[in-house]
Every structure is written in C-alpha cells, then in structure tokens.
Amino acid sequence: MVALSPPPILTIYRRSGCPLCDEIDAALVEILADRAALGLAVPAVAAVDVDADPATAAAYGGIVPVLSIGGTELPLVTSPRQAKRFLARLLDRSEEHTSELQSLAYLVCRLLLEKK
C-alpha cells in the first residue's frame, strides 16, 4: 500500500489593512471549497503577516498578496482567477504525477529496474 503524502502548504504572504489581501483571502475560501467539492487536492493554508518580520517585509512588503506553494510563488495576486489558475497549475499537475507514480504500470517498471 502506498502512503499518501500530506497536503501541500499554500502560504499567503499578506499584511493587515491591505484591501487586496482581504479580497484574495475571501476568494481563496471559495476557491478551496470548490476544489474540495470537486474532489481535487486542497492545500493546507498558512498566512504570514509580512510586517511581523523585517526580512519578510523587505522581501514581500511591496508585492503582497503573494501565494506560494513548494517554492513557486505568485506575487501581487490581483484577481481570484489568477489564484485559481495558480492552484490548478501546481496542485493538479502534482496530483496527476502522484497518480501516475502509484499506477500498476509504474510499479511493474520500478520492480523490473530494481532487479537489475
């Protein structure tokens, strides 16, 4: 039996008092609920206040909100559509790859290669 990997983490770099950050937060609630209803991968969410740390503020302060999954970032997210496409591109590709790696054909190939 293949163990399932934990869900990826979606990090949202934001700041309080940022209307655009608030809009994207609200949109993400809907986007993630839609993904869950469709049976698609839903990441765990971590919010980072960029003003809590000077280094983070220097890196992200001028481009919030920023979405990040596994090191891939989408700076200055200005629309729910951008966020939705970003999640689909990263999560659905990852899910397809995982399914492919769990397939019987992959298992047979891997076992044959291990015998050599």
Image (cartoon, helix red, strand yellow):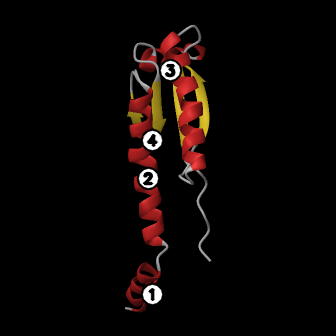
Earlier sequence position, callout 1 versus callout 2: 2
* Residue to which mark 4 is pinned: 87
Q: Tell me if 86 is positioned left or right of 36 in this view.
A: left
Determine whether label 4 and label 2 are within 8 Å by CB.
Answer: no
Q: Secondary structure at mark 1?
A: helix
Residue lying at the far top in this picture: please name it: 17
> The N terminus lies in which quarter of the figure?
bottom right
Q: Secondary structure at mark 4?
A: helix
Q: Secondary structure at mark 2?
A: helix
Mark 4 vs mark 2, CA separation in Å? 8 Å
The kind of residue on which mark 2 rests is Asp
Which disc number belongs to residue 56?
3
Earlier sequence position, callout 4 versus callout 2: 4
Q: Is residue 9 above or below residue 99?
A: above
Determine whether label 3 and label 1 are within 8 Å by CB.
Answer: no
Which disc number belongs to residue 92?
2
* Residue to which mark 1 is pinned: 111
Earlier sequence position, callout 3 versus callout 4: 3
Q: Nearer the viewer, residue 72 or 99?
A: 99
Earlier sequence position, callout 2 versus callout 3: 3
Displayed quadrant of residue 50 = top right
Earlier sequence position, callout 4 versus callout 1: 4
Mark 4 vs mark 1, CA separation in Å? 33 Å
Image point (44%, 52%), residue name: 92
Label total for image: 4
Q: Given this view, does label 3 or label 1 mark the residue nearer the observer?
A: 1
Determine whether label 4 and label 1 are within 8 Å by CB.
Answer: no
Image point (40%, 17%), residue name: 63
The kind of residue on which mark 3 rests is Thr
Earlier sequence position, callout 3 versus callout 1: 3
